[in-house]
């Protein structure tokens, strides 16, 4: 596996490195926390907020954590994932910008080039069932972002997300997928090849607990998708919404962007639709209406 056998924990991020930790143990403990009744990102974040220095293993018995870790490794191996990495709050290269989220995640799984998480990046999101014009706008936007040196981040969903990832790759750029499933699980199924390509050549990130996801029914697992939007917003400088309905998950990311003090851009075509009301509301809150690409570059300054 790509993570080392041990890592080092820095006290408060300022003092000397102390207390060697086991990534495997922390992975198992994180998974065990998610098996507790009523576990949610909110409740787990609140638990860690009480003790900002805590690690997952501080809340779980070692034997239970080890059992969970072994089961996770077995499930991922069966799903075709033989190499992956993890990021833990307080250890290694955990991105500090994730702490801007309302309920920051303590633990992430990933495959690919982690250094892309620290590159200049912008999220491009929108409808799973976009119009042809929406797809074309997404492709032009992704190509422009690549030309400007940005990594294109999206959620690997159908529609706008898929178009953004593919256009970035075709333009010779970089892309990050923040998925709403564990590593090795594919949704939608038609993106299996694209997901593997991103994992091998770019960066695939998941905050979804493997054991909880494996034991729940699909309807319950759908709740993980909107949660990843907050993480997607946190790791980027800004979010651009291409096309979305009044009930789109993209609006969850828009609200997260405001909370995290990230820039939010909305393409002008959204304002020209008579069947939605959200664009005007978000502009009143500080979003930028994008009539031309320069509106994005000016808004970032």
Image (tube, grey):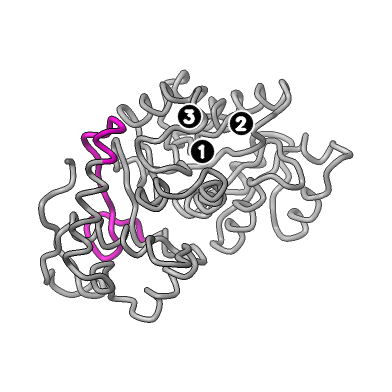
Residue 208 vs 190, above or below: the answer is below
Give the distance between the C-alpha atoms of the residues marked 2 and 3, in whole angstroms: 16 Å
Please say whether residue 301 is visible from this viewpoint: no
Q: Disc 3 designates what residue? A: 146
Residue 60 vs 206, above or below: the answer is below
Give the distance between the C-alpha atoms of the residues marked 1 and 3, in whole angstroms: 14 Å
Instruction: State the mark number for residue 160.
Output: 2
Query: 275 or 257: nearer the eye?
Result: 275
Q: Disc 1 designates what residue? A: 154
Q: Which residues are magenta?
A: 75-96
Instruction: Point out the frontmost of discs 2 and 3.
Output: 2
Residue at 18%, 58% in the rendered image:
66
* Earlier residue among tags 1 and 3: 3
* Earlier residue among tags 1 and 2: 1
Q: How far across and down, in percent of the image, does residue 81 sit?
A: 27, 34
Residue 169 vs 283, above or below: the answer is above
Q: Residue furthest top?
A: 170
Q: Residues within 10 Å of mark 1 (few under 14, many from 20)?
A: many
Image quadrant where residue 177 sits: top left
Give the distance between the C-alpha atoms of the residues marked 1 and 2, in whole angstroms: 9 Å
Provide the secondary structure element on which disc 3 rests: helix
**Membership of 243 in magenta stretch:** no
């Amino acid at each position: 596996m790509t993570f080392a056998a041990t890592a080092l924990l820095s006290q408060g991020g300022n003092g000397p490195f102390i207390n060697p930790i086991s990534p495997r143990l922390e992975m198992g403990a994180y998974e065990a926390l998610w098996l507790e009744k009523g576990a949610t990102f909110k409740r787990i974040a609140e638990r860690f907020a009480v003790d900002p220095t805590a690690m997952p293993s501080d809340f779980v018995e070692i034997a239970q954590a080890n059992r969970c870790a072994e089961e996770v490794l077995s499930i991922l191996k069966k799903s075709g994932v033989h190499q992956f990495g993890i990021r833990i709050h307080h250890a290694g290269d955990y991105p500090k910008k994730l702490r801007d989220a309302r309920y920051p995640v303590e633990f992430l799984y990933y495959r690919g080039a982690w250094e892309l998480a620290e590159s200049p990046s912008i999220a491009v999101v929108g409808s799973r069932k976009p119009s042809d014009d929406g797809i074309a706008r997404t492709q032009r936007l992704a190509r422009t972002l690549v030309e400007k040196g940005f990594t294109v981040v999206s959620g690997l969903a159908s529609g706008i997300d898929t178009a953004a990832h593919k256009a970035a790759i075709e333009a010779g750029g970089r892309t990050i997928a923040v998925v709403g499933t564990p590593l090795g699980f594919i949704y939608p199924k038609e993106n299996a090849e694209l997901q593997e390509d991103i994992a091998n050549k770019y960066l695939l990130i998941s905050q979804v607990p493997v054991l909880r996801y494996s034991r729940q029914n699909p309807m319950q697992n759908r709740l993980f998708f909107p949660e990843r939007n907050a993480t997607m917003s946190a790791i980027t400088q800004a979010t651009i919404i291409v096309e979305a309905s009044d009930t789109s998950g993209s609006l969850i990311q828009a609200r997260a962007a405001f909370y995290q003090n990230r820039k939010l851009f909305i393409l002008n075509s959204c304002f020209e639709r008579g069947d939605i009301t959200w664009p005007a509301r978000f502009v009143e809150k500080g979003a930028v209406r994008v009539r031309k690409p320069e509106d994005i570059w000016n808004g970032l300054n």
